[in-house]
Amino acid sequence: MGYEHTNSRGVKYYLHTRGGKLFFFSKNSADSVDLPEGLMVVENERTGLPMVKRKA
């Protein structure tokens, strides 16, 4: 099972990747991946959508 994030509105999103460099979230849990080391998840305050960001 890959990385799962529940946003502030209670919606579950699952992390996916394309080519190992492009990360995106989807409501579909099939083929989800784990969160790589050195990355963190932040949430857009206005829309509630999760995004992947490098740790500072």
Image: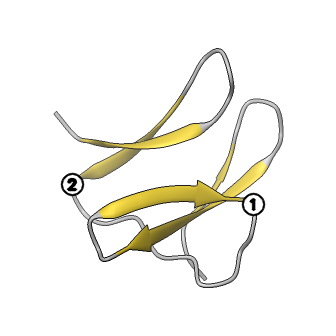
Residue 23 sits in which quadrant? bottom left
Task: Give the CA separation, mark 2 to mark 1.
Answer: 23 Å
Residue 28 sits in which quadrant? bottom right
Instruction: Please state, as top left, top right, bottom left or bottom right, where the C terminus lies in the image.
Output: top left
Q: Residues within 10 Å of mark 2 (few under 14, many from 20)?
A: few
User: In the rendered view, does 35 fall on the left or right side of 56?
Assistant: right
User: In the rendered view, does 41 fall on the left or right side of 32?
Assistant: left
Q: Which mark is residue 38?
A: 2
State if disc 1 and disc 2 touch (CB < 8 Å): no
Residue at screen point 61% across, 83% down: 1
Residue at screen point 24% across, 63% down: 37
Question: Height in image: 28 above or below 56?
Answer: below
Identify the amino acid type marked 1.
Lys
Q: Residues within 10 Å of mark 1 (few under 14, many from 20)?
A: few
Residue at screen point 43% across, 70% down: 17
Q: Nearer the viewer, mark 2 or mark 1?
A: 1
Q: Which mark is residue 27?
A: 1
Q: Nearer the viewer, residue 49 or 5?
A: 49
Question: Height in image: 24 above or below 2?
Answer: above
User: In the rendered view, does 38 fall on the left or right side of 34?
Assistant: left
Residue 34 in percent (x, y) is at 44, 73
